[in-house]
Image: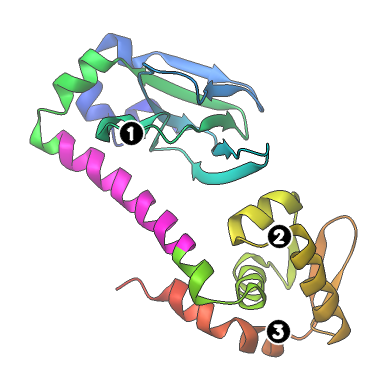
């Protein structure tokens, strides 16, 4: 996406500092958890993963930021620090909005609505995902994940740990579910991470409550 086509461009077009593209390679850190006075960042190209580290060193997936979305230490706007790192999943291009300019922009009603809308939408999705952990069993969540992610009945888990974090399922529990589904001839699983759906109807029956929750956005 071009900067001129982004949702933020009308607000920053008169600020030369905000139109500079900062490029990051895959795996590079855009902001880290110990930063105390980070400026605001906006994604123009690529995908960024927001992660936290637990007290025992476990990496926890918190959020994904894609193009035309905010990233960085956004919680500081509300006087909080979620202690997260923002890591480039793909090569990325972002613009940086210094604090003084952001503080000036936020005085504008239209910019406030733009900022809150982008933030609220993503925070709502995060809350929705966390709520699903309490409402549905790990079997239901994993079954729904396969239904929603599959293309031509194939779903590829490139990173098992990330899948576990997204679904709120332990690695051991996930492999138990996979073994159970294979025994029931619902899926087949290869060590490469490829999951093939063999009985979509049975899988959908398991996933149905979680699917209805995910699809109900009215």
Q: Which mark is residue 31?
A: none
Above or below — where is 31 with respect to 156?
A: above
Dot 2 corresponds to which residue? 170
Q: Residue furthest front?
A: 55
* Disc 3 secondary structure class: helix
Could you say which is closer to the camera, residue 9 or residue 36? Answer: 36
Dot 1 corresponds to which residue? 80
Residue 20 quadrant: top left
Above or below — where is 116 with respect to 186?
A: above
Above or below — where is 128 with respect to 117?
A: below
Q: Is residue 62 left or right of residue 198?
A: left
Could you say which is closer to the camera, residue 175 or residue 108? Answer: 175
Could you say which is closer to the camera, residue 201 or residue 5? Answer: 201
* Disc 2 secondary structure class: loop
Dot 3 corresponds to which residue? 200
Q: Position of residue 117 (x, y in %)?
A: 25, 47
Labels 1 and 2: the sequence-earlier one = 1
Colour approach in the figure: rainbow
Residue range (magenta): 111-130
Distance, label 1 to label 2, CA atoms, is 28 Å
Q: Position of residue 103 (x, y in %)?
A: 18, 21
Distance, label 3 to label 1, CA atoms, is 44 Å
Quadrant occupied by the N terminus: top left
Distance, label 2 to label 3, CA atoms, is 24 Å
Labels 2 and 3: the sequence-earlier one = 2
């Amino acid at each position: 996406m071009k900067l001129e086509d982004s949702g933020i461009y009308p607000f920053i077009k008169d600020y030369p500092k905000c139109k500079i593209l900062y490029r990051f390679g895959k795996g590079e850190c855009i902001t880290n958890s110990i930063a105390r006075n980070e400026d605001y960042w906006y994604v123009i190209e690529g995908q960024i993963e927001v992660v936290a580290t637990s007290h025992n060193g476990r990496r926890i997936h918190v959020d994904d930021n894609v193009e035309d979305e905010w990233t960085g230490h956004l919680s500081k706007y509300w006087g909080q620090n979620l202690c997260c790192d923002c890591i480039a999943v793909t090569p990325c291009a972002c613009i940086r909005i210094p604090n003084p300019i952001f503080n000036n922009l936020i005085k504008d009603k239209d910019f406030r609505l733009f900022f809150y809308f982008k933030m609220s939408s993503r925070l709502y999705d995060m809350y929705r995902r966390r709520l699903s952990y309490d409402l549905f069993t790990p079997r239901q969540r994993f079954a729904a994940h396969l239904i929603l992610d599959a293309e031509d009945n194939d779903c590829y888990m490139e990173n098992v740990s990330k899948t576990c974090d997204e679904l709120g399922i332990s690695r051991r529990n996930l492999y138990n579910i996979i073994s159970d589904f294979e025994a029931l001839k619902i899926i087949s699983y290869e060590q490469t991470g490829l999951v093939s759906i063999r009985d979509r109807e049975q899988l959908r029956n398991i996933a149905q409550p979680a699917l209805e929750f995910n699809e109900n956005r009215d």
